[in-house]
Image (cartoon, helix red, strand yellow):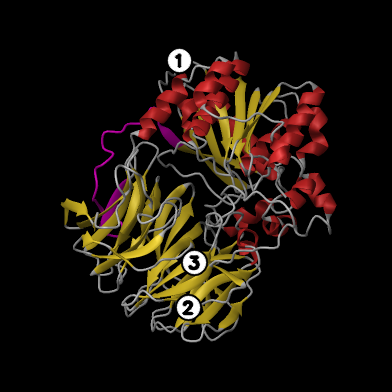
Amino acid sequence: MIKTSFAITLTFLISYSAIAQTNGQNPGTAEEVIAQLSKTQAITETVISPDGTRVAWVTLPSGTAPRIQVASIDSPANAKNLVGAGAASRKGSEIYEEHGIAWSPDSRSVAFLSDRSKPGQLQLYIVSAAGGIAKRLTSLTGFLDGVSWSPNGSTIAMLFTENAPRASGPVQPATIQTGVIDTQIYEQRVALVDVATGAVRHLSPPDLYVYEYDWSPDGKTLAAIAAHGSGDNNWYVAELFTIDVGSGRTNSLLKPGMQIASPRWSPDGKSISFIGGLMSDEGVVGGDIFLVPAAGGPSRNLTPGLKASAASLVWPRDRILFTENIDGESGVVALDPASGELKQLWRGPENVSATQGNFGLSFSADGNRSALIRSSDQHPPEVWAGTTGSWRRITSINQNVKPLWGESRSIHWANDGFNIQGWLIYPRNFDSSRRYPMIVVVHGGPSSAVRPSWPGTFFNTTVFSADNYFVLMPNPRGSYGQGEAFTRANVKDFGYGDLRDILAGVDEVTKTLPVDKERVGVTGWSYGGFMTMWAVTQTNRFRAAVAGAGIANWQSYYGQNGIDQWMIPFFGASVYDDPAVYARSSPMNFIKTVKTPTLILVGDRDIECPTPQSYEFWHALKTLGVPTQLVVYENEGHHIARREHRLDIMTRSLNWFNQHFK
């Protein structure tokens, strides 16, 4: 249970101006960086038409409502707004939400979600692909997501959580709970909308939370990844189901014993493919590609020994196409499901996505063409489309936005028999005759990976490079990008082998580049926050630390967080069955060794890494006389949303390191 009364005793942040005055801080570099990033027009999703001739995307210009735009891939200069204002628009300059583009199978219409008719309540709309006034199909109350047309175009499916008090997902701020706890669970169900009449039918049962689904080629069945119980918690134990479109009858096809994502039917409807592996965060996908008969039976690994991590997939015609994390880069691969033969279609040191935060591409029906959002740490996001691997740029909306930080380079080092990769961002005004401080940034997860991408404003660590630091972003064991064995290499070993990998990377940089080894700091958010807390209990080589949304005590954390199911695959058992394995990796059990000044940051309604974890670590450091500060951000979850809070995190972190590096 999360109580507001607990957080009242801590430091709440209301506005950045008040913070700066109170603490005597000068926003300086952080304000400059966030101002520059605010000039970037966000592109939140892009979708290619099934016939491969057009591409639609959503842009979010700063301070204005989103725009759905469409262009011919062969004539991108003639892009236009897809959705006319019509009767559904709001008066004045009120900002609304609009996303969830889905093309009809014949490429003539586009469905999308919008809250134009009522602030905060999305509804399903359709509009002609030629543009015009959109038609609203639904009048629902709850959270809508995951729009997809049936193969014959008569029905639109979507994920619907009726009367949901908040958006789904554990990174969202928790609903404040009082009274009898856990008596109401809001299940995300598949709903079917008749395109002609707008009639809505709940398909999946009310006790099953559906995370993802895919239409069978004949439109008679859905493949779905789903689980009973809390949607935030049970993704980690989700099963592969089939759902009969006519009757709604469900059948558990596979209990995989691992985390699964991206269910996709074979073109003949006889098999279902999916990605399976060790995954620590819903939506952050990595693993091998598996195949299971649609009629039931054991699954088969199609990519055993893959030295990369599959992240998303589609199955057009006779081949599976998938994106991958590979050695800190992005890739697109074609897989022959019969022979297992792999063909690399493209690879590059950048980030690719079809929707914001979702590593993947949008493919035409035949798989020959695709659309994506491309970015790197040196190039802001733009829409690209065309033949896969030979895309052409469709937009140029961010061409005048330039980085305020240094260049990045991929580096490698060896440790404990592993080949470790990471990214090193150079200082903004690098001069080889100078010596520089360095900040080590540990990514979250742990099942994740750092790839070059245009930074956002949440936990932006390029601000250190902009202030003339080196920034090391390692991908230690437990990360994606080197194969499933590498991702599993930290099981029951949190903080040990992965920290050795990180420290070996620090050694590699400090012996080859002008880095002052006496001025090295460490920071991270989520798992990176844990690793920061852990690192300062294991070594005194870091001069200062900033722990964001960390985990101080795995034993108490098990009973405090809202997603305890994620821990069992990594620790091998629950904390009640094997408390020793949790104690072994808990920073609190080594707290008296800490000498490193540590700043601690967290949201007050964080489900994934609850506030008490940060409070416990801060309380111990304060008691032991270690320089420390705890900042709790009001009405924030695991993902910090408010601009003034993000700016404070950047500024406060930079000031903390500057203060302790003098």
3 or 1: tag closer to the N-terminus: 3
Q: Name the residue under label 3.
A: 160
- Whole-angstrom CA distance, mark 3 to mark 2, is 15 Å
Please state which of residues 479 and 398 is positioned toward the viewer in this rendering: 398
Q: Is residue 425 visible?
A: yes
Q: Identify the residue shown where x is 59% and y is 22%.
A: 657
Per the image, label 1 sits on a secondary structure element best described as loop
Residue range corresponding to the magenta coloring: 382-409
**Camera-nearest label, 3 or 1:** 3
**Camera-nearest label, 1 or 2:** 2
**Quarter occupied by the C terminus:** top right
> Main SS type for the magenta part?
loop
Please state which of residues 25 and 117 is positioned toward the viewer in this rendering: 117
Q: Identify the residue shown where x is 43% and y is 78%.
A: 266
Residue 575 is left or right of residue 167, and the answer is right
Per the image, label 3 sits on a secondary structure element best described as strand
Q: Is residue 354 visible?
A: no
Compared with residue 385, is residue 136 higher up or lower down, i.e. above or below? below
Q: Name the residue under label 2.
A: 222
Q: What residue type is labelled 1?
A: Ser
Q: What residue type is labelled 2?
A: Leu
Residue 356, position as x, y percentages in the image: 42, 51
Asked whether 399 falls inside the magenta stretch, the response is yes
Asked whether 185 falls inside the magenta stretch, the response is no
Per the image, label 2 sits on a secondary structure element best described as strand
Q: Identify the residue shown where x is 63% and y is 71%.
A: 256
Residue 577, position as x, y percentages in the image: 84, 59
